[in-house]
Amino acid sequence: MLPQVLGTTALAAAALALLPAAPAQAHSPFGFDSLSFPPATEDGVTLTVRAPSHATARQIAVMLNGQNVTASLQAVPGTNTLAGTVTGLVPGSNTLQLRPRANAAAVAQVKVHVITAADCNAARLGTDIDPALIGEPVSGVVLTSTTWTAASASNQAFCRVNGSMAPIDPTAPNINFGTTLPARWAYRYAQMGGGGMNGSIPGLAGAAYNNRGMATAGSDSGHQFIGGNAWGLNEEAIRNLGYMQMKKTYDAARVLQQRAYGAAPAHSYWFGSSQGGREGLTMAQRYPEAFDGISVQVQIVNFSSLMLGPVLLRIQEKPLANWVTQAKRTAIATEVMRQCDGLDGLLDGLINNYQACRAIFDVKQGAPNRQPWAAKRCPDNIDPNPADTSASACLTDGQIETLQFTHTPYLFATPLAHNNPQFGMWLPGTDPGGSGLIQANRFRGQEGAADNAPIYSHLGIIGVTGFLFQDLGANSLDYVEGGPLNDRRVEISAWLDATDPNLRPFKQRGGKLISVIGTNDTLASPGAQLDYYQSVLDTMGRGSVDQFARLWVLPMTNHGLGGSSYGVNGAGEPNATFPIPNGHDRVSMIVDWVEQGVAPPKAPVVTAGARSLPMCSYPAYPRYRGSGLPVTEASSYACAVD
């Protein structure tokens, strides 16, 4: 079925406002536009250099340690740039200069420091780090190993240093960390965020970072899941997970860069997704002086509440009548598609207008006593075929109540960290049961569960039984909002939640932030993410935010920012599915913004194969322009706000 274009009558209620383009950034007429290191050429550096005009580009000179290496570069057709790989880097410090002419003074300069396998050892890098150099409390830092990895076909050589930080509380676990030091260092540092509940050091020295001359580091956040979840009862371990381990790792990595290269990095970056995204936001909020550029994706925001969120769903389903079963997944997804697909001007199985769709199914918005699921209600509240897995399956009143609970923000008895009053829950989408949001079984404490039914558990359950209840054997379904655990809820929220909307200190010291979320994410909470975006705009103002941050949304993408259109469109007709465009270069975007002052567009084009869309800044969404324009091209869409 071809996508259907909706006429203006169907959308007469939508008042559209196109977002203005971001102001142009100041850009020096001369400069080094890019810098990377080819793995196969150990003394080489790949450059792109910029001149004010095509004529001046023919005259510029690139000098490496005083030697003219311009002959190694070629003019890039249609631009004012030269590009290529120059050789001649030597161990130690190297200087690249750009001159308007060979005998003129330098107008731009970058440095590269080269180390070799002979530098990757304890004699050079040490066996410990003074705890006084670590900005959060530790009792000791031991460097446990150094390993040199030779260059491969895709990655330059690097030195790996592993270490361990001892806690102040002797019953808390150590923080294990790793740092990589590239053979050719561009005075750049990138810290890598974790994932899930952490517990292991994330991947380091990826080619996208190492070949850009970035030292990298990351930690297991201060627990290893050895011996079970006992660490979840230790306050220092919880606070390490929440915020301290990121700063401790950052400080240790800076010491090692100073020892290896004799200098601190000129530019520091954070890259993280999910848990690692929360960590990146936390660094911007708690330690705004640490990073020049932070790139986060599908970040957890209300960490303490996200761990509790699935428990709240199971508590809502304590009455057997409220249980939404697996059989209803297709009926739920199809109904969401029916009501939301056309809100972006096109019936194509892709819900781009996420805000309007959220407003439909959030019963606290709009007129009182709305019934967004009325079309799916079982006649007389009796399900004639509970096993029906088709789109025509009906929903009982109790099931509808649970779905309304799932898609409506959850209000706290007491505001949590940063005066946050609510948890945004999940947006309506095409994967209503993803990440265990719909369960196939009953659990102890729920009506109809067997006496020997399992106690409910999920990925973040330790944050409920351990952090909150302080009893690993507790049944999380005993939680009561505003009950005896309320003070503890407030306490751990202050350690764990990245909900501070005041990013002015980060902005004022020149920091740049790029964030991307997906609205079909069932592992994180898109509702909480969108609410955080709005709180930043409310606190700082759109104009201020656009100067240092990009708050992007990829509609109907999942926790990996991937996804496909739905197989049935909003008219209930079969729909040829396609991958949702999501491709963009997050590393280049943040590096160019920090180092060149070139801000990414407010609506960059993202791709998936031959298909493209604009990636719009919150709260805008890609709205089809109509008039027969090709639906596969980004130019056929405008970033709009209803």
Image (cartoon, grey):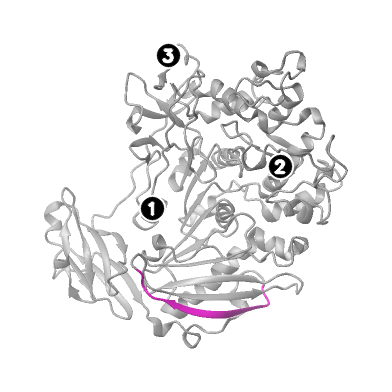
Q: CA distance from mark 2 to mark 1?
A: 38 Å
Q: Nearer the viewer, residue 345 or 25?
A: 345
Report whether residue 449 is seen. Answer: yes
Viewer-side label of 3, 2: 2
Q: Which residue bears the numbered disc 3? A: 8
In primary-sequence order, the first of circles 3 and 2 is 3
User: What kind of element bears circle 2?
Assistant: helix
Badge 1: how crowded within 10 Å, few (<14), some, or many (20+)?
many
Residue 67, percent across and down? 18, 75
Taking the magenta stretch, the answer to whether it contains residue 148 is yes
Q: Which residue bears the numbered disc 1? A: 593
Q: Nearer the viewer, residue 155 or 305?
A: 155
Amino acid at circle 2: Pro
In the rendered image, the quadrant that contains the N terminus is: top left
Residue 50 placement, left or right of 283:
left
Q: Give yes or no for contact between labels 3 and 2 (Cβ–Cβ under 8 Å).
A: no
Residue at 66% x, 51% y is 497
Q: Which residue bears the numbered disc 2? A: 310
Q: Which residues are magenta?
A: 138-152
Residue 367, percent across and down? 66, 18
